[in-house]
Image (spheres, helix red, strand yellow):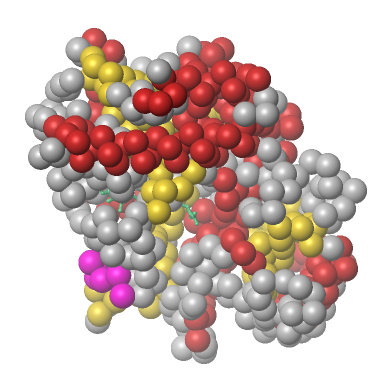
Amino acid sequence: MKNAKIIQDLEKLGIKGNYHLSYNPSYEELYQAEVSSENQGFEKAELTESGAVSVQTGIFTGRSPKDRYIVQDDITKDTIFWDGKVNLPTTPEIFESCKELVLTQLSDAKKIYVVDTFCGTNEDTRLKVRFIVEVAWQAHFVTNMFIRPSHYDLENYGEPDFTVINGSKTTNPNWEEQDLNSENFVMFNLTEKLQIIGGTWYGGEMKKGMFAMMNYYLPLKGMASMHCSANVGEEGDVALFFGLSGTGKTTLSADPKRYLIGDDEHGWDNNGVFNYEGGCYAKVIDLSAEKEPDIFRAIKRDALLENVVVNDGIADYADGSITENTRVSYPIYHINKIVLPSKAGHASKIVYLSADAFGVLPPVSILDENQAQYHFLCGYTSKLAGTERGITEPEPSFSPAFGEAFLTLHPTMYSKTLIGKMKEHGAKAYLVNTGWNGTGKRISLKDTRAIIDAIIDGSIESAEKTTIPVMNLEIPTSLPSVSEGILDPRNTYSDVAEWEEKAKDLAAKYIKNFEQYCGNDEAKKLIASGPQLQEQTI
Ligand SMILES: Nc1ncnc2c1ncn2[C@@H]1O[C@H](COP(=O)(O)OP(=O)(O)O)[C@@H](O)[C@H]1O
Ligand SMILES: C=C(OP(=O)(O)O)C(=O)O
Ligand SMILES: [Mn+2]
C-alpha cells in the first residue's frame, strides 16, 4: 500500500523506470546493501572492527559552497539574503535543467531508497523531509542524522514538506553556458520545496542543506534558529555552544555530567531549546578514547565513518591523508546521556566558541549584553592555512551568527531573535577561545572543559576579574582546575609587546568587519563594546 503510494509520488516528481523501492529501510537492510559485492566505486562500504561501516565520499570531503544555489523567484527574491557569496541565485530554468539530470539519473537506478524523516523536534515547526537516493550509505547517513519517525508517524506522514533528490552520480554538462561554478550542483527551490544534488557525495550537503531551510522558515516565525550544540544539566539548566566548524561544538557538548540535546543545529521557541536533528556528525581526526570517550564509544554498529583511512578493518583516526575533515555520523542514542525527544527548557548559558589561531583571545571572556550582540554578529574564528598544524598563516574569518554559510536571511534576523530570547530569559554569554595562545599550542581540551564547567556551575562569576585592553574583554584571573597562567593570554608570551601587536592587528580586523553593520544606529552603538584601537579611544 505505502510502497504503491511512494512509487506514485516518485512518478509525479518525474522518476520513472524499473527500480526496486526501499522505503525507510532498517539499519540491518542498509548494512547488507552497503557491503554488497555488487557495489561500484564510492557506493562501497567496508565493515570496521568497531562495528561501524566506513565509506569514501570522493573528491568532495567537505561542503562545496561555490556550487550551492537558490532559485530566485517571487517567493525568494525579497526574503533570501542575496549577499553574493553564500546564497547564490539561479533561475527556475536552470534549476529545471539540473533537476532533469537528477531525475534521469534516478530513473535509471536499479534501486531507490526513500527515507522519510523529520527535521526539527517539535510538531508545529518541524519539516517533514523526504530523501530520495540511490546509494545505500546515503540512506544510512540521513537515517542517522535526521529524526527517525516512529511506525505510527510513518503511517500518518502525509505529504512531505521538503524533498531532497540526491543524484550524486550525475554532473551537469551545461554548467559553462549556464554560467554556473562547475559541473557539480547543490540547488534549492523553495517554491517547489526541493533540494537537488549532483556531483558531490559529501553527506554534509543534505544535513546542512535542510539546516539552511530551517534558518529560513523559523526566524520568519520569530524563533531563534542557531548553529550551536546544546546540553542540559540535572537541574534543567540549558547551555548552548555556538561556533564554526572545528571550534568544538560536538566535542564540548558531549559532557558526561550533562544530557546532550544535540551537537549542531537548534531552534529556540517559547517553550525552550530544541534540536533539528536525530544524530551527530563528529570529526574523528586524532580521536582517542582517552580525550573524547563519549564520541569514541558512539562509533559502533550503525555508525558511518567518512573518509577515514582503514587498514585491515581497523580505523586509523590519526591518518589525515584523505582529508583532515574525517567524520562519523551516528544516531543520537549512541551517546549515553541524552534527552529524548531532543529538547529542554530555555537556555541560561550561551558560549561562543572561537578557535583563534593568532593566540590573541583569552581562553574565556565574560560578555555583557551589548558584547553578546557584538560578538554574535562578528562570529570570529580563524581558519588555518592548508592542513598544517601550528600557526603559520592563519586566516581570520568573521562569520555572522557563527554560521554564515547556512544563513538564508539577513544576519541581523538571527541576532535579533537570539538576543531577544537571551534577554527574556536572562541568559549570560561567554566567549571561549578553543584555539591557540602565545605558547604556539592549542589550548588543551582539559583546560577548555574546566572553563566550561566554571561557566556552567557559575563559579566564573565569583572569580576575581580583570580587563584585557585592546580586545576590551573581561576575564577571570583564575578558575578551579584550569592551568595556572593561561587565562590572561598576555602571560603566555615571553614579551607582552608581541601579544599587543597581534591584538591590535586583530582589533583592526574586527573594527573593519563591523563597518558593514554601521548603517544602523542600534548596531553603531555596539562599536563601543568591541575591540578598541588606542587611536580611537583618545
Ligand atoms: N581546547 C579544545 N576545545 C575543543 N576542541 C578541541 C580543543 N583542542 C583540540 N580540539 C579538537 O578540535 C576539534 C573540534 O571539533 P568539533 O567538536 O567537531 O567542532 P564542531 O562541532 O564545532 O565542528 C576536535 O577534533 C577536538 O578534539
Ligand atoms: C557538517 C558540518 O558541520 P560542523 O563542521 O560544524 O560540525 C559542515 O559544516 O559541513
Ligand atoms: Mn560538529
Question: Which image quarter: residue 199?
Answer: bottom right
Q: Quadrant of the C terminus?
A: top left
Question: Which image quarter: residue 466?
Answer: top left
How far from the left and from the top, in percent, is residue 97? 83, 74
Q: Is residue 56 above or below residue 284?
A: below
Q: Is residue 129 above or below residue 534?
A: below
Residue 353 visible in the snapshot: no
Dominant secondary structure (helix, strand or loop) of the stretch shown in magenta: loop
Q: Quadrant of the N terminus?
A: bottom right
Question: Residue, x 9% and y 29% (percent of image)?
Answer: 484
- Provide the residue span drawn in magenta: 315-321
- Answer with left or right where residue 502 lies relative to residue 225: left
Q: Nearer the viewer, residue 510 or 239?
A: 510
Question: Residue, x 40% and y 53% (percent of image)?
Answer: 395
Marks counted in the figure total 0
Q: Is residue 255 magenta?
A: no
Q: Is residue 470 above or below residue 210?
A: above
How far from the left and from the top, in percent, is residue 19? 72, 81
